[in-house]
Each structure stands twice: as C-alpha cells, then as structure tokens.
Amino acid sequence: MDKIYKASKLDFMLIRYYLKSICFTVCIPFVFVLVYRSLITGISFAMFMMAMSSIYTFTVAEKNDMHRFYGTLPISTAELVCGKYLHLFLLGAISLVISSIVQPLILISLGVTISISEVLVAALIGSILFITYTAFQIPGYYKFGPIKGRVFMYIPVVGVLLTMFVLEKANLKSMEILDAIGQNKLILPCFILIYIVLIIGISIMSSIKIVKNKEW
C-alpha cells in the first residue's frame, strides 16, 4: 500500500504544471450551476470536467518519455497502475467535496432551497459518473497513449450529455431520487456497491494486463 501511495504521489508531482488548468476546471461548474440552477446537473458537470483532466498524467509521461523511468522503479506494474487510479480518484474526491460545498451555497444565495439529502444524492450520482468515466478512460490511455487515445477523453462528454438528457426527459428531482432510494433501502445500495467494485476491478485488471503486455 505504501508503494501505491508513492506512485500516486509521483503522479501528483507530474501534474503540478497543470495546476492552474485543474483549478480552472474545478471553477467552471460554478458558472454552470448558475445557469441551470440544478445541483445534480452542476455536480455531474463538475465530475465530467475533472474526468476530462485524467489525460494530464499520461500526456506528461509520454512527453518526457517517463516509461523507461517507471521501469527502473522498485515497484510492480500492479502497484504503479493502482497508484494512477488512486491519484485520479483523489482528484475526483477533491473536486466532489469542493463542488458539494460551493454549489449549494451558490444555489442558496439565488434563493433555491437545498437540503442535506439533496446534496448527498447529487454527490452520489456525481461519484458514480466519475468512476464510470475514469474506468473506461484509463485502460484506453494505457493502450493507445494520450495522443491516439484522445478519443477516450470524450467519453465524459457523452456521459454528461446523456445524464442531462435523462434528467430532462424524466424530469427527475433530487427528492424523487431520494424517495426511490428510500423505497429500496437494501437493493439499490447493494447494486451501486457491486457496480462500483466490478467496474473499478475490471478497469484496473485491464490496465495492468495492457501495461504488462505493452512494449515501450
């Protein structure tokens, strides 16, 4: 676990040149929530923006030919890949926490009533979307690199557009979703947990296999 943490720390060091871009990425959804006045839409957009940023570490690594450097480190491929996932999930968590605090305050200042339950529902949906985006993106970046695999950067675009379409067509509100969760106190949480574990597990195993089989 210590080596995974160190691998994650290395990725954070790599993206220090993109710090301003990442901060800008975190702030853009604040404007978005002002327009749509929907917490679910705002937080979903925030996680979409952060998922788009997952390409940064791969771009820096390829630009500086760091794959040879990775090969000299006393760390296994699995630990190196897991460190990458930890790094991206931590970035997502930071963005989620900031969005879950600032966006409700923005909406409240506009006269929109926001409850703790609505914040939790929006955060849950945002988390699931972010995990889904990155689970598909990372193996693609490992397989094709940040240039040829740039198409994977647009997976979140499809995801956020689909989310907004579903919310608009179904006219779903946070409390309606909360009621649905309340009526399925055991089934829905178990389904979500199984989904998250499976998609992360499959994604990590795919990435490890790709890296092991790839010739740098």
Image (cartoon, rainbow, N blue to C red):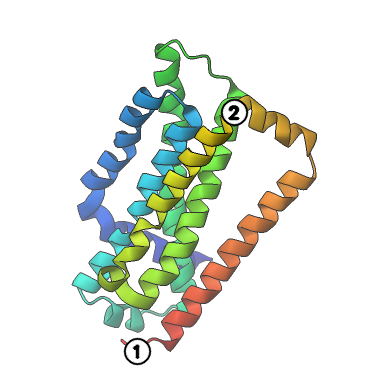
Instruction: Specify few, some or many for label 2: CA neighbours under 10 Å numbering under 14, 14-19, or 20 or more.
Output: some
Q: Is residue 198 among the parts visible in the rendering?
A: yes
Asked whether residue 6 is in view, the answer is no
Q: Position of residue 102 (x, y in %)?
A: 41, 26
Identified at 19% across, 71% down, the residue is: 63
Identify whether 45 is placed above or below 199: above
Residue carrying label 2: 174
Quick one: label 1, few (<14), some, or many (20+) residues within 10 Å? few
Q: Disc 1 versus disc 2: distance between alpha carbons?
A: 48 Å
Q: Which residue is mark 1?
A: 215
Q: Quadrant of residue 181?
A: top right
- Determine whether the residue tagged by mark 1 lies in a helix, strand or loop: loop
Q: Quadrant of residue 144?
A: bottom left
Where in the figure is residue 55, as x and y percent of width and height? 32, 61
Q: Residue at x 48, y 28 (%)?
A: 39
- Amino acid residing under circle 1: Glu
* Closest to the observer, 69 or 137: 137
